[in-house]
Amino acid sequence: GTTLGASAAEKGRYFGTAVAANKLSDSAYTTILNREFNSVTPENEMKIDATEPQQGRFSYGAADQIVSHARSRGMSVRGHTLAWHSQQPGWMQSMSGSALRQAMLNHVTQVATHFRGQVVAWDVVNEAFADGSSGARRDSNLQRTGNDWIEAAFRAADAADPNAKLCYNDYNTDNWTHAKTQAVYNMVRDFKSRGVPIDCVGFQSHFNNDSPYNSNYRTTLSSFAALGVDVQVTELDIQGAPANTYRAVVEDCLAVARCNGVTVWGIRDSDSWRASQTPLLFNNSGQKKAAYDAVLAALNNG
Ligand code: G3I
């Protein structure tokens, strides 16, 4: 193939990007988006603060715009994200206990229902584990509603959209030796053994000098896949965009049969949440960087 999406498709995968609704009017942006990618993840537009800014009042305009742009061009959509400690609207931040649990479950149900049939995979729960060596859950208002909040969210999403793939998504879970990775692995193993409806695990893969890529990533992906879930690289960006590291990530995914797609977290460096790290595949002018060539070659050779 001559584009990322077409080349990934030849390998039975997708190649996606995060998309911001307010950039869909930028033709330099949409030219690359429409040419190169066959999956999109709304960068912020499906988050809780965007979709339920006031309790019980749902707002889907920006998300619908992205979904419509994508689906009318044959791109699939990853939904991000239904339940998260961050980007909560003010009303939710101030809630706790059973009222918060009920509000969270209602949010999951409403949003998954709205997008039923349009989103192939949902990040049902995002970033629920703590960093560091504890292997513990992250403290949050959602966690304080009870340790079973994650499986409750998955069951609600499954009831609302039984055909979507339901994913757990997190960062710093790529290095197999890290406690956080093992903790998520143990949760997924437990969910599979008890029939909690989980289909996939997303590895954000925000690599930088503090959290570098490690060659045991392939072991991580294959170990999770062996539990009976799909795995996906969901938010890839790499400080400095070294071609070798981009190539390695793509090769790791291609080496694991159940790794069914890679998403980069933005198109041009200037679109990145870490723009100063120039971590993406296209420069600010929209030109392909060396990392782009490495990724395309890996997709075609792998
Ligand atoms: O839209 C408002 C704008 O109206 C306002 O003037 C401006 C001033 O701050 O803020 C704008 O909102 C910002 C939004 O991005 C859109 O640019 C928010 O402040 C800012 O917090 C938000 O950051 C996003 C961040 O998630 C929020 O948690 C990033 O774009 C987005 O890339 C980032 O993505 C996350 C994933 O969801 C989860 N994994 C980590 C990843 C990187 O942090």
Image: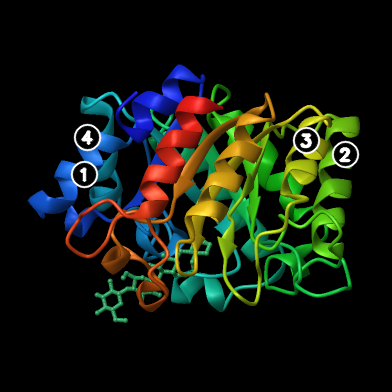
Q: Earlier in the sequence, mark 3 or mark 1?
A: 1
- Between 30 and 142, the residue placed more toward the observer is 30
* Disc sitting over residue 189 in the figure: 2
The N terminus: image quadrant = top left
Q: Amino acid at mark 2?
A: Arg
Q: Which residue is mark 1?
A: 32
Q: Earlier in the sequence, mark 2 or mark 3?
A: 2
Give SS at disc 2: helix
Q: Amino acid at mark 4?
A: Arg
35 sits to left or right of 39: left
Whole-percent x, y for residue 282 in the image: 29, 55
- Between 239 and 21, the residue placed more toward the observer is 239
- Between 295 and 192, the residue placed more toward the observer is 295
Residue at (84, 63) in percent of width and height: 178
213 sits to left or right of 33: right
Q: Which residue is mark 4?
A: 35
Q: Earlier in the sequence, mark 3 or mark 4?
A: 4
Give SS at disc 3: helix
Q: Residues within 10 Å of mark 4 (few under 14, many from 20)?
A: few
Q: Which residue is mark 3?
A: 222
Whole-number angstrom distance, CA of label 2 to CA of label 4: 38 Å
